[in-house]
Amino acid sequence: MQFKVLKTDPGSQARAGIMHTAHGVIKTPIFMPVGTQATVKAISPEDLQRLKAQIILGNTYHLYLRPGTDVIAHAGGLQKFSSWHKPILTDSGGYQVFSLSDLNKISEEGFAFQSHIDGSKHFFTPEKVVEIQRKLGSNIMMVLDECVPYPAEFRYVQKSNKITIGWAKRSLSTFANTECEHGFQQDIFAIVQGSTFPELRRECAQALVELDFPGYAIGGLSVGEPREEMYEITSVCTELLPKNKPRYLMGVGKPEDLLEGISRGIDMFDCILPTRNGRNGMAFTTFGPLSIKNARHRESLLPLDSACDCYTCQNFTRSYLRHLYNAHELLILKLLSYHNIHFYLRLMENARTAILNGNFSAWEKEFLEKYKNNDEIN
Amino acid sequence: MQFKVLKTDPGSQARAGIMHTAHGVIKTPIFMPVGTQATVKAISPEDLQRLKAQIILGNTYHLYLRPGTDVIAHAGGLQKFSSWHKPILTDSGGYQVFSLSDLNKISEEGFAFQSHIDGSKHFFTPEKVVEIQRKLGSNIMMVLDECVPYPAEFRYVQKSNKITIGWAKRSLSTFANTECEHGFQQDIFAIVQGSTFPELRRECAQALVELDFPGYAIGGLSVGEPREEMYEITSVCTELLPKNKPRYLMGVGKPEDLLEGISRGIDMFDCILPTRNGRNGMAFTTFGPLSIKNARHRESLLPLDSACDCYTCQNFTRSYLRHLYNAHELLILKLLSYHNIHFYLRLMENARTAILNGNFSAWEKEFLEKYKNNDEIN
């Protein structure tokens, strides 16, 4: 993994970097739209191009179950299969086994679980999950881990850490002894677990750093713990993670969480919020969140966000968007998802510019002032 | 209504024409994608532009109920409201009152009906429906009519014809005494009814022709009658309708029906098939209809239609599209709807070229030979 930090903010841990993959360059900090089933919900690959998305997520658990690893391998990997020709990161499935599947059972060997689609029985080992991701051809693979629910007992997490660390070792060894089935370089990231116990986070991070992965993720956050605890644990981890490697905070979060993450040294984020909230009629705007269902928008000829230059804001009024939502029209799902992804990607772009200009904290303050005082306009 | 027939096919009644509206020119024969609620389902206005759609449909019944005529008038009319800046035709609501609403009751005065959304009570008169369409600002309005169900008694249709003709007169008079609320020229078409009785079709057509409307539609077909009867009644009507005015066959139909309609002198069509069938996993292709659900497409790296240059066919395999369909992903609704509208619009474009080249019948035969022999490929 070629990764370079170009500049670090003088007033925080925030950093601007650049990452090279076989399918292109990624400028960090970056937000990765979630394309669980080899598609970002309601958004086409050409929409993603126009949004200037640099990397999207896929999910090993979902893709293994449907359409099946062989179907994607036959197409030449995820990029060719989905016609998204830029970088893809695939999550390992650890989180999905824990949150979606029925009757999952963890042992040192791996995860036994039943498909959420048809109840069929499956077994994931760290080795198998690397092999699947070799076939999927994701640019960045994730190791299998146990995502510990919140709250958790100290002793349970201690035990779980051992499994997660052991699995990381086995993943790395499989990674070293296999090759991408599609002829390009792939990378693999480890995932720091340890729930909200700083010493267990440190223990896990240190063990994983010793294994010398190309990049590190922080998992098991944004699972119900208080926001402040999430921020604190993020710092606990980034303090120990190597400065010259990318850091990815998994499944986080709201715009303000992304900025907190950046200021604590995070480079990469993913979250379903922009698409899921979009499908539920909620838009992220410069002036705070906006619910398009609100009756006050009935005849409003304003765009969602007067400071936004996306396709949705340049072409449609709140009045029309509200109508689409109320009439259950499919177009609203695309238009709000599109705007929200645009909002997240521009937020990261602006944060990066601010870091490079050395004024991240001032920029962040200005952004949050507008974003938090939304009563008048939204 | 400025309309000119540029060429008539020597071997049939097929004609190529050009129509001028305040929002642009329409080259006929034309297919009009259906945008019932001020949006073509799953398709954005920029998609429609790229598809080279020339005119789309809206529906008075739906738009009057939701978002309400006032909301659209406030936005400056349907084009501004929906950000589709080309021509729009609005159906009058006669068909929807008959097919969608509860407890509808017809009298000489008009239609009493209950909303299919909330059960609220409404009354449509021919005058009111013209006034609504004045506010909506559609380029082509349709008169209120009674769409007679199939099969119908001769005497019922005879009585219904009187109502439909009387309503057409009142519509034209309201049209003459009102103006578009948005400052541009609108036109109004009459609708020939008469079920499958040739003499009642002739009676209705003659009465409406005497009223001298800018254009004529044939309604009440494709409601369950045998295909041959639909074709025959179309001919009965077009024989009587003025040669120098546009003719619109409402709600029809399959690709082969459109060609039959063209050869019988029809200039305009609308139908929900390309979008509805698309949402149900069915694609219209050069080589016949294709169901993307079919297991044979599991690993197929072919496009939907190897002779198609649309976005869907240029970028996605059957394998990927089948996966999206099976995984209930929203993107499939757009990709199949987009391809199907493309198919219908190119079909009309090619028919027009053939008419202008004087070889419509030969072209039609060639098209149908490919389209009807689809076992091998689809």
Image (cartoon, coloured by chain):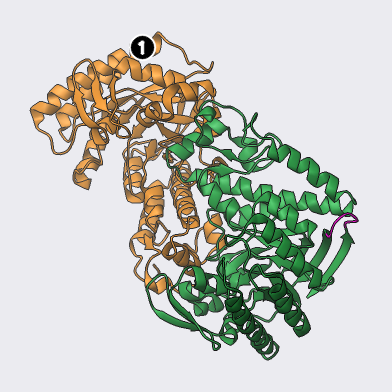
Chain colours: A green, B orange
Q: Which residue is mark 1?
A: B174
Say which chain tag 1 marks: B
Taking depth in this image into account, of A172 and B294 the one nearest to the observer is A172
The quadrant of the image that shows the C terminus of chain A is top right
Q: Say which quarter of the image contains residue A12.
A: bottom right
Q: Is residue B199 left or right of residue B10?
A: left
The quadrant of the image that shows the N terminus of chain A is bottom right
Taking depth in this image into account, of B131 and A320 the one nearest to the observer is A320
Taking depth in this image into account, of B77 and A134 the one nearest to the observer is A134
Indicate the position of residue B61 as horizontal and vertical percent values: 35, 29
Marks counted in the figure total 1
Does residue A71 sit above or below A332 in this rendering?
A: below
Taking depth in this image into account, of A66 and B252 the one nearest to the observer is A66
Disc 1 secondary structure class: helix
Indicate the position of residue A181 as horizontal and vertical percent values: 63, 83
Q: Residue at x 67, y 74 (%)?
A: A191
Does residue A230 sit above or below A342 in this rendering?
A: below
Asked if one can make out residue B274 in the rendered structure from this viewpoint, the answer is yes
Q: Is residue A198 left or right of residue A220?
A: right
Tell me which secondary structure the magenta stretch mostly adopts. Answer: loop
Q: Residue at x 30, y 23 (%)?
A: B144
Q: Residue at x 55, y 49 (%)?
A: A277
Indicate the position of residue B183 as horizontal and vertical percent values: 54, 15
Q: Say which quarter of the image contains residue A114.
A: bottom left
Indicate the position of residue A353 as horizontal and vertical percent values: 84, 51
The magenta span reads A9-13
Q: Amino acid at mark 1?
A: Thr
Q: Label 1: few (<14), some or many (≥20) within 10 Å?
A: some
